[in-house]
Image (cartoon, coloured by chain):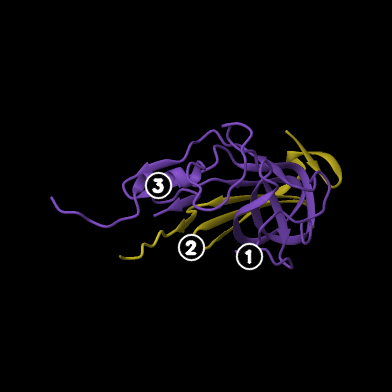
């Protein structure tokens, strides 16, 4: 499999991959870092919104 | 049965579809769904609830990122469930083979049909991207987790 990197197109077998997962209350972020030796040559990121925002409707009284 | 004061459930979703105008509003050319976009901002920007319109100030710059951001897929109508109205875009916001070397942590959703008026901001762990794909994936579209909910 070819992978587009800062060094051009490289074969997947040349690269090592590391996933970094961070999670907050309503968001999970997965960063995928691709390394050629010690050098990072590509970084993908997926932000997963687990829960959106809520707007409360408040009512006065008469 | 008894009478109960309430903000009517139908009103909540009708706010999201522009049915009610309790103040002076805009003249809408059609009854079509508005077009929305999603723009990304550096951690050093100041995008928050006070945002009124899309701005380029603090917006990310990078290869394969176009100012203004990505088109928001919107084939999901607002829905009422119980006392909550909710809406979630029908697809992820995504960029391919993008490089954004300085950390960013915010996306602004705004309405291009209505003069780029701001809708909502969402923040996440600061990230960078290097010739990679970046996507913001949507939550489950329901009354508990939908991206925008009125309750």
Toward the viewer: B122 or B110? B110
Residue A12 is drawn in which quadrant?
A: top right
Q: Are marks 1 and 2 in contact (CB under 8 Å)?
A: no
Task: Say whether residue A6 is left or right of residue A49.
Answer: right
Q: Which mark is residue B50?
A: 1
Q: Residue at x 74, y 46 (%)?
A: B132
In which chain is the residue bearing label 2? A
Q: Residue at x 57, y 36 (%)?
A: B74
For the question of whether residue B12 can be seen, the reply is yes
Mark 3 crowdedness (10 Å alpha carbons): few <14, some 14-19, many ≥20: some
Q: Are marks 3 and 1 in contact (CB under 8 Å)?
A: no
Q: Looking at the picture, does residue B88 appear above or below residue A49?
A: above
Which residue is tagged 2? Answer: A25
**Residue A27 placement (x, y as % from top left):** 53, 57
Q: Which quadrant of the rendered structure holds the C terminus of chain A?
A: bottom left
| Colour given to chain A in the rendered image | yellow
Which residue is tagged 3? Answer: B11
């Amino acid at each position: 499999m070819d992978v587009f990197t800062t060094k051009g197109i490289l074969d997947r077998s040349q690269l090592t991959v590391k996933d970094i997962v961070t999670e907050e209350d309503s968001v999970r972020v997965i960063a995928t870092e691709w390394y050629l030796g010690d050098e990072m040559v590509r970084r993908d990121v997926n932000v997963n919104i687990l829960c959106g925002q809520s707007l409360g409707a408040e009512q006065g009284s008469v | 049965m008894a009478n109960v004061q309430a903000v009517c459930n139908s009103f909540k979703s009708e706010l999201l579809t522009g049915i009610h105008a309790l103040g002076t509003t805009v003249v809408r050319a059609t009854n079509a769904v508005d077009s929305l976009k999603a723009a990304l901002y550096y951690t050093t920007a100041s995008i928050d609830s006070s945002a009124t319109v899309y701005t380029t100030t603090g917006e990310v710059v990078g290869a394969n990122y176009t100012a203004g951001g990505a088109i928001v897929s919107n084939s999901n109508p607002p829905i009422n469930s119980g006392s909550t109205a909710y809406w979630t875009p029908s697809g992820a916001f995504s960029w391919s083979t993008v490089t954004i070397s300085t950390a960013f942590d915010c996306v602004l959703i705004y309405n291009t049909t209505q003069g780029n008026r701001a809708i909502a901001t969402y923040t996440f762990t600061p990230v960078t991207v290097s010739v990679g794909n970046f996507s913001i994936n949507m939550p489950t579209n329901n009354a508990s987790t939908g991206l925008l909910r009125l309750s």
